[in-house]
Amino acid sequence: MSGGKIVTNGGWCPRWRDPRALAAMAFAAFGLVYMIVNATSLIDQRQALGQPIEPWRAWLLEATSFGSWIVLLPVILWGASRIARLGKPAPIVIGHAVMCVLVSLAHSAVMFVARAVSFDLAGVRYGLSSPPFDMLVFELRKDVITYVSVVLVFHIVQRLVATSEAGTGETGQSSGLIEVRDGTKTIWLKPDEIDLIVAAGNYVELHGVFGTKLVRRTMAEIEELTAPLGFVRVHRSRLVRKASISSIETRQSGDFEIFLRSGNSVGGSRRFRANLQ
């Protein structure tokens, strides 16, 4: 059975090249600093107003908010990568709007439960300082900024990783090459040698002048990595390199047939027609 992976400079572990992992680490680092600044500022402000707050309360309030974001971070990054595949601006905006509201509701819920349990353990009763609806609206206004920041960082990191991996070189340690293993044999393929990528369960088939090679990658992973290299989704289970296309024939149903310069053809779904524009 063949397998493969995307190879990048320096021999990094794949996890540290994953835009979601890098975005999560960046958010965690920034969020920790933000939590410290907010907690110390709250203590100082309340002191200046003559309404001092016990330091442990301030730290607990900020820590539960930050901790709730950490819990929800994998969901946000997963949603961001899925929404990005919608292709058109309107669905993407709507998708993020819905996701942001759901994340804000989840953040408020997780935060409230964490605070209630923590204060209870400290022997203090925790309650809302305003009606639930007012609290949710208040939190939503703040959560929008955090949500947008996380998504922007994710896409910036994704672009930086993709740009790094787009470079080519002469050896297998060069970035942008796809490593394919077949038993004891290993070969490296340049992106411009690949015409078509087809899903095959937890593997993907790479089609090109070399024939067909099987790589152990999910379709979602390979799409995320090859999109900056000129590959577009034309079907739920197919990616095509745009530079490999010689012509497109649209059927009456809206689906289409893609003719590659290699002489092969592949069917496309009308759902993804806009990706070829």
Image (cartoon, rainbow, N blue to C red):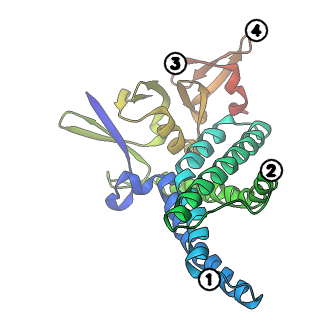
How far apart are the two marked residues, 2 and 3, measured between alpha carbons?
Answer: 58 Å
Q: Which mark is residue 40?
A: 1
Task: Tell me the amino acid under the disc marked 4.
Answer: Gln
Disc 1, SS: helix
- Foreground mark, 1 or 4? 1
How far apart are the two marked residues, 2 and 4, measured between alpha carbons?
Answer: 50 Å
The residue pinned by badge 2 equals 133
- Foreground mark, 2 or 3? 2
Q: Residue 240, image x and y in percent?
A: 56, 30
Q: Earlier in the sequence, mark 1 or mark 4?
A: 1
Q: Residue 33, image x and y in percent?
A: 56, 75
Q: Earlier in the sequence, mark 2 or mark 4?
A: 2
Identified at 43% across, 43% down, the residue is 190
Q: Does any portion of residue 47 appear in the rendered image?
A: yes
Identified at 74% across, 90% down, the residue is 48
Question: Residue reaching furthest left?
Answer: 184
Q: Residues within 10 Å of mark 4 (few under 14, many from 20)?
A: few
Q: Which mark is residue 252?
A: 4
Disc 3, SS: loop
Q: Residues within 10 Å of mark 3 (few under 14, many from 20)?
A: few
The residue pinned by badge 3 equals 264
Depth order, front residue of 97/184: 97
Task: Tell me the amino acid under the disc marked 1.
Answer: Thr
Depth order, front residue of 61/81: 61
Q: Earlier in the sequence, mark 3 or mark 1?
A: 1
Q: Residue 84, image x and y in percent?
A: 65, 42
Q: Is residue 42 above or below residue 84?
A: below
How far apart are the two marked residues, 3 and 4, measured between alpha carbons?
Answer: 21 Å
Depth order, front residue of 188/28: 28
